[in-house]
Amino acid sequence: MNQQTLIILAVMVALIAAIIAVIAAIRISMHRKRVQKLEQRRDDQVHYAFIINPSKPTAETTRGKIKEYCARKGLTEVMFIDTQLDKDGRACAQEALDKGADVVIAVGGDGTVRTVASALGGSGHAMGIIPIGTGNLFARNMGIPIDDIEAALTIAVSHGSHRVDVGRLRILDVPSEDHAHAFLIIAGVGFDAVMIDDTDPKLKKNVSWLAYFISGAKHLFTPKYRASITIEDADGDLLTHEDTEFRTFMAGNCGQIPVFSLMPDASFNDGLLDFEMIDTNGGLIGWANLFGDVVHQTITGKAAQSPLSTHSHIDQMQGVQAEVKLDKPVPAQVDGDMLPETQHILFTVDREALIVRVPLENENISATTQIPPIKAPITDATA
């Protein structure tokens, strides 16, 4: 290796080091600004329950940080309840309420948040979120920092909340299903569920949400699904799609995922679900067209297909419920959690049933994904 090459390598290393240093400095500055703004929020000295998913790699470290934070803030009424294989977030949250918790805080990914919300919806008790999962899609949509535990904690234990709709998916043809499954982001049947079910957990830990795309590539040419779908709109009118084919059918409460917008019109507090039926044809051309459609609506912020699409179709509707009758059992998912295969599903929505502690709009603490503005913060004692 000659001297000129060594000089070039040294310059490159120096540039990389400088870039890393600048990024670190920016992050430190942003963290300090967040803390300064959040410290202005009024602490809520009530009884807190932290529901922790211990399977997350950072669970124990996060538990320690929570204990240190609560001790520093003088929060003495604190309990910790861990999820288990036979005890999900829903059961843990119900236990917390039975033990007198005023605010229940989900510490985990979207699955933990979803199941905790399932118990809290309609209870009048507020939910906080400490995101330590891979996707953290609901936290992103609500503007809760996903890379700053202390900021998320400050939001969770201080006043400033918002009412959020809770979607429900009820499986009607499985006798053992005794309750509707809550979802806060997106639930669906078909390709999306198959993609999620086949995602490698190890790959998901390594590359986060990108693992879903790798799984999806393996199922691009699976057979389509067929169903009769009846949607009830806000006025009570019914729209029926008889014996229709599709790749996937989804119901959304929030439409933003990392980088892309699946449902630009979705609002988490309008009392409506956004239903999306997706189909493609022409093999890879169809899937390429579909990707173009998603990029188009992400850029425009409107639920409309790209004018260049010829082999894909996205049918988007809003309503208060949808009944889906399939010709055969298919996989179903809620916020990334798999459910038993089903032929008969009912999607409904509970308007503003959940109180979630969030950054206030004027704090400008948004996550990496752009979100709709948060309106009318709640400031009552338990919110």
Image: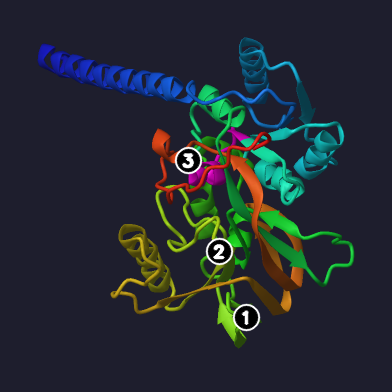
Q: Is residue 131 above or below residue 65?
A: below
Tell me the kind of residue under disc 3.
Gly
Pointer 2: what residue? 219
Any mark on residue 236, and which? 1
Tell me the kind of residue under disc 1.
Gly
- Does residue 300 show up magenta in the picture? no
In the current view of this chain or complex, which residue is farthest to the front? 380
Mark 1 or mark 3: whose residue is earlier in sequence:
3
As helix, strand or loop, the secondary structure at mark 3 comes to loop
Question: Which tag is nearer the camera, tag 3 or tag 2?
Answer: 3
Q: Is residue 95 above or below residue 273?
A: above
Residue at the spot 64% in from the left edge and 45% down from the top edge: 355
Image quarter where the N terminus lies is: top left
**The magenta stretch spans which residues?**
129-143
Q: 234 or 200: which is nearer to us?
A: 234
Question: Which tag is nearer the camera, tag 2 or tag 1?
Answer: 1
Pointer 3: what residue? 143
Kindly indicate the quadrant of the structure image that contains residue 282: bottom left
Residue at the spot 30% in from the left edge and 17% down from the top edge: 21
